[in-house]
């Protein structure tokens, strides 16, 4: 399926604040440094380009860690969902959930994976702006010729609560209320885990649940018996015929998630068939988890042209024994794989930031294969090649090619689109009309941080 295009555009306001923030990892009061800008409107392509340069959003505020200065450098991390390889601990989480759904029982085991980064009370990864924009440009009207200055396409961020509304093209723009209902309906029918009405656990009068390994053994024996019968029908001796070796194909993520439940399970998991995706446009969705009719977790996801970005997850700590943080990540990976079947370019799962200097955040590196973004050249490097460097220094240039440079950081400032008094002009003209405004250093800093592609396609608001 081809990527849907529309005429949405991006308006940002750069906030040049170089003071230190409180760090959510080492708990220092003023050692967390980052650059920020306010997103009045944002297209999906613009945000895709920004996160590929180390930016991240918290609602409508976008921020980029000052990697060589901040106390706990945050490296953008992504996982190749198409080639995902499950670890033993991740398989245990999936088996634990299956066991809970099957008979309601869970072995007394220590929760697997580090859930501290995704909790019911907040995500320490976020940087909160010290001030917000005093302007509201979310609904500004620009003429078609002005909008053509931008080369990006996608959706527009209007939501004052931080969620990005999905744009379904020109027709849907004329009926936003209709698209809201589509998104609401889709988000409410993603994943529902609920108990069978009146069930209080396994019924002792019913036959015991069959183990999955017993079912697999019976299937294997039936296959061998069928093969022996075919051999005998040809007049051959089964003992002299080479036995069929059981398939050694490793179970996929979908195999674990779709593992058959007993005939009468303690809990029922409705078929997980996401009815949203690029065919409804790109944007932000709420991924809900319902257990016994009770909402126990919600994940906020951004669906972008090349990835599914996990923005945030909060869950009920009463169910931490199910390792919902890890389970939700695996569900989101499965969703990425599902979307990739519809849009071939959408194959990456972005997990936010990887902080090697913070041990509790290293769990993200357990999703393989994963890659970290080099903070100097903005190329992706396999995480296994990065770890030795990060063991020596918490900040490191990850790209081993010493001759490589940030080619996208070479920006002609005069070409940057500026939105001034609701009119679009290039920065060269803006500077000529406002010679007393001394902001060239600030504009250069902005251009280097967002890169050439974004600098030429996004509209930079100047008061």
Image: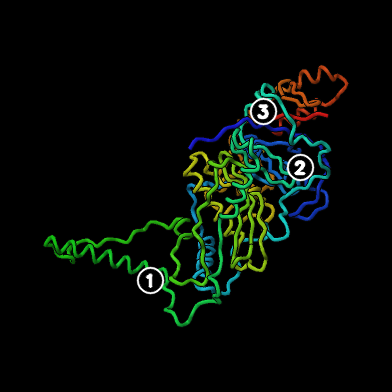
- Which residue: 54% across, 76% down? 201
Q: Disc 1 vs disc 2: which is toward the camera?
A: 1
Q: Is residue 66 visible?
A: yes
Q: Can residue 52 be seen from the camera position used here?
A: no
Q: Upstream in the sequence, badge 3 or badge 2?
A: 2
When the figure is inspected, residue 3 is found, relative to residue 102, above or below; the finding is: above
136 versus 191 height, above or below:
above
Residue 19, above or below 251: above
Q: Percent x, y for residue 177?
A: 65, 43
Q: Earlier in the sequence, mark 1 or mark 2?
A: 2
Furthest toward the right, the residue is 436
Q: How is the image coloured?
A: rainbow
Q: Are marks 1 and 2 in contact (CB under 8 Å)?
A: no
Residue drawn at the location 75% of the way across and 44% of the way down: 160
249 relative position to 32: left or right: left
> From the viewer's perspective, is residue 197 above or below residue 394?
below
Q: Which mark is residue 34?
A: 2
N-terminal of the two: label 1 or label 3?
1
Left or right for 131, reference 246: right
- Residue 127 horizontal/vertical position (percent): 76, 47
Question: SS at mark 1?
Answer: helix
Disc 3 residue crowd, few under 14, some 14–19, many 20+, Cα 10 Å? many
Q: Closer to the camera, 89 or 427?
A: 427
Residue 30: x percent and y percent?
83, 49
User: Which residue in the protein does label 1 denote?
Assistant: 214
Residues packed near mark 1 inside 10 Å, few (<14), some (14 to 19) or many (20 plus) = few
Residue at 56% x, 40% y is: 306
Q: CA distance from mark 3 to mark 2?
A: 23 Å
Residue depicted at 66% across the width and 69% down the height: 318
**Residue 391 screen position, x and y as percent:** 64, 50
Residue of label 3: 457
């Amino acid at each position: 399926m081809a990527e849907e295009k529309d005429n949405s555009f991006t308006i940002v306001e750069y906030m040049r604040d170089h003071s230190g923030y409180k760090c959510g990892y080492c708990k220092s009061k003023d050692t967390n440094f980052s650059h920020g800008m306010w997103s009045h409107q944002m297209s999906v392509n613009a945000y895709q380009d920004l996160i590929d340069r180390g930016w991240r959003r918290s609602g409508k505020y976008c921020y980029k860690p000052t990697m060589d200065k901040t106390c706990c450098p945050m490296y953008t991390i992504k996982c190749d969902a198409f080639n995902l390889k499950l670890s033993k601990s991740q398989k245990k989480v999936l088996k634990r959930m299956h066991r809970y759904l099957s008979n309601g029982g869970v072995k007394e085991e220590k929760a697997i994976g580090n859930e501290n980064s995704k909790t019911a009370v907040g995500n320490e990864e976020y940087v909160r702006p010290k001030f917000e924009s005093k302007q509201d440009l979310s609904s500004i009207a620009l003429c078609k010729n002005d909008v053509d200055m931008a080369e990006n396409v996608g959706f527009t961020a209007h939501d004052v609560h931080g969620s990005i509304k999905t744009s379904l093209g020109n027709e849907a723009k004329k009926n936003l209320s209709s698209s809201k209902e589509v998104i609401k309906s889709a988000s409410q029918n993603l994943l529902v885990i609920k108990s069978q009405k009146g069930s209080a656990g396994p019924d002792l009068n019913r036959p015991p649940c069959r183990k999955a390994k017993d079912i697999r053994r019976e299937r294997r024996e039936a296959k061998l018996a069928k093969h022996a019968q075919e051999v005998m029908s040809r007049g051959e001796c089964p003992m002299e015929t080479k036995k069929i070796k059981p398939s050694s194909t490793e179970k996929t993520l979908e195999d674990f998630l779709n593992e058959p439940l007993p005939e009468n399970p303690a809990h029922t998991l409705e078929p997980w068939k996401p009815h949203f995706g690029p065919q409804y446009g790109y944007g932000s969705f709420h991924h809900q988890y319902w257990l016994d009719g009770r909402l126990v977790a919600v994940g906020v996801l951004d669906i972008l042209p090349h990835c599914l970005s996990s923005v945030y997850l909060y869950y009920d700590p009463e169910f931490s024994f199910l390792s919902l943080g890890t389970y939700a990540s695996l569900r989101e990976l499965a969703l990425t794989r599902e979307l990739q079947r519809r849009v071939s370019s959408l194959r990456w799962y972005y997990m936010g930031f990887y902080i090697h200097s913070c041990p509790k955040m290293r769990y993200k590196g357990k999703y393989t294969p994963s890659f970290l973004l080099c903070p100097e050249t903005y190329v992706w490097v396999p995480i296994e090649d990065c770890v030795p460097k990060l063991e020596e220094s918490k900040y490191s240039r990850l790209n081993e090619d010493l001759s490589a440079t940030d080619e996208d950081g070479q920006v002609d400032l005069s070409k940057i689109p500026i939105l001034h008094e609701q009119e679009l002009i290039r920065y060269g003209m803006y500077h000529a009309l406002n010679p007393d405004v001394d902001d060239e250093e600030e504009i250069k800093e902005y251009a280097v941080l967002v890169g050439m592609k974004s600098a030429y396609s996004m509209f930079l608001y100047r008061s």
